[in-house]
Image: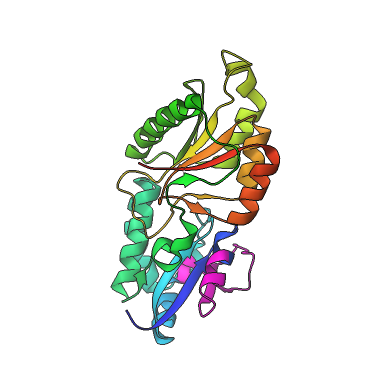
């Protein structure tokens, strides 16, 4: 598809990495969101005028990149056309995050704008199968990864989360709305008491996209902070579904994992 490209940026390293991969991109951010790169602000309450402005600028593709909280909408800011979309957006939000994102993709499409997945725009951010670090997973880690993959697949069926922590076959925590960092913080505070053998395998964080998830938006992502938090939680490594998870700051992640003695494993599914 010809035309210009734009990034709708949230917080975190992903918008920065995507801008580096696509320096020609224009960058926009919802009001109240402060990404780590320059961006032009817009209001969700004026979504239709914003989409019209994108088409006027010749933008035919966008990527939704970075963390975003559900906005607190101000009824006084709505324009008439955007106000007409509120019932469909509210219905989608009540059905879950994945349904909300699918509805947003549909709205962009109605204005002739394709929401492109990061895997199509910067495939180098999604490592294929292999161990990236000097430390390698043990046979016990492989069993924990298999158990964690089954748990995350089950969570994804009900649109709950994209991650879990498993040690010695036990699920120490599962990801929900607060996110990966909150889950790892919980494990850091409570995980040692939950392991049946304190001297046994330390366990791992596993991440994967939800079954049937749209690859245009909300692919799970890992960064240097994830490595540090996994270490603080007493884990032995991080595993993810190969080709399904964005690896941000890859070289820095691998260096930090090697320094801390963790393994990073893109697991074939």
Relative placement, left or right, of 99 versus 166 is: left
Where's residue 211, x and y in %? 32, 43
Where's residue 184, x and y in %? 60, 35
Q: Which residues are drawn in magenta? A: 17-46
Regarding residue 234, the answer to whether it shows in the image is: yes
* Residue at point 35%, 74% (across, down): 113
> Is 66 above or below relative to 256?
below
Where's residue 70, x and y in %? 49, 53
* Residue at point 36%, 56% (across, down): 215
Quarter-of-image position of residue 78: bottom left
Is residue 20 located in the magenta-colored stretch of the structure? yes
* Residue at point 44%, 41% (across, down): 162
Residue extending farthest to the front is 134
* Residue at point 39%, 74% (across, down): 61
Relative placement, left or right, of 127 versus 112 is: right
Q: Quadrant of the N terminus?
A: bottom left
Closer-to-camera residue (77/117):
117
């Amino acid at each position: 598809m010809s035309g210009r490209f734009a990034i709708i940026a949230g917080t975190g390293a992903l918008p920065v990495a995507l801008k580096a991969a696509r320096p020609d991109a224009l960058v926009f951010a919802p009001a109240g969101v402060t990404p780590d790169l320059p961006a032009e602000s817009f209001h969700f309450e004026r979504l239709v005028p914003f989409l019209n402005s994108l088409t006027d600028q010749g933008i035919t593709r966008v990527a939704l990149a970075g963390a975003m909280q559900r906005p607190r909408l101000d009824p006084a800011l709505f324009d008439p056309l955007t106000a007409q979309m509120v019932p469909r957006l509210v219905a989608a939000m009540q059905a879950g995050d994945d349904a909300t994102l699918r509805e947003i993709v549909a709205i962009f499409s109605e204005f002739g704008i394709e929401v492109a997945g990061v895997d199509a725009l910067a495939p180098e951010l999604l490592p294929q199968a292999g161990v990236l670090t000097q430390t390698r997973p043990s046979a016990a880690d492989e069993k924990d990864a298999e158990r964690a993959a089954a748990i995350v697949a089950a969570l994804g069926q009900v649109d709950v989360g994209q991650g879990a922590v498993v040690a010695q076959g036990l699920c120490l925590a599962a990801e929900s709305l607060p996110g990966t960092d909150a889950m790892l913080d919980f494990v850091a505070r409570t995980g040692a008491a939950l392991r049946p053998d304190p001297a046994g395998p330390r366990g791992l964080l596993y991440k994967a996209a939800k079954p049937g998830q749209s690859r245009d938006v909300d692919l799970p992502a890992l960064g240097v902070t994830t490595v540090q938090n996994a270490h603080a939680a007493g884990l032995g490594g991080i595993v993810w579904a190969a080709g399904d998870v964005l690896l941000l700051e890859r070289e820095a992640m691998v260096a930090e994992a090697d320094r801390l003695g963790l393994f990073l494993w893109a697991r074939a599914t």
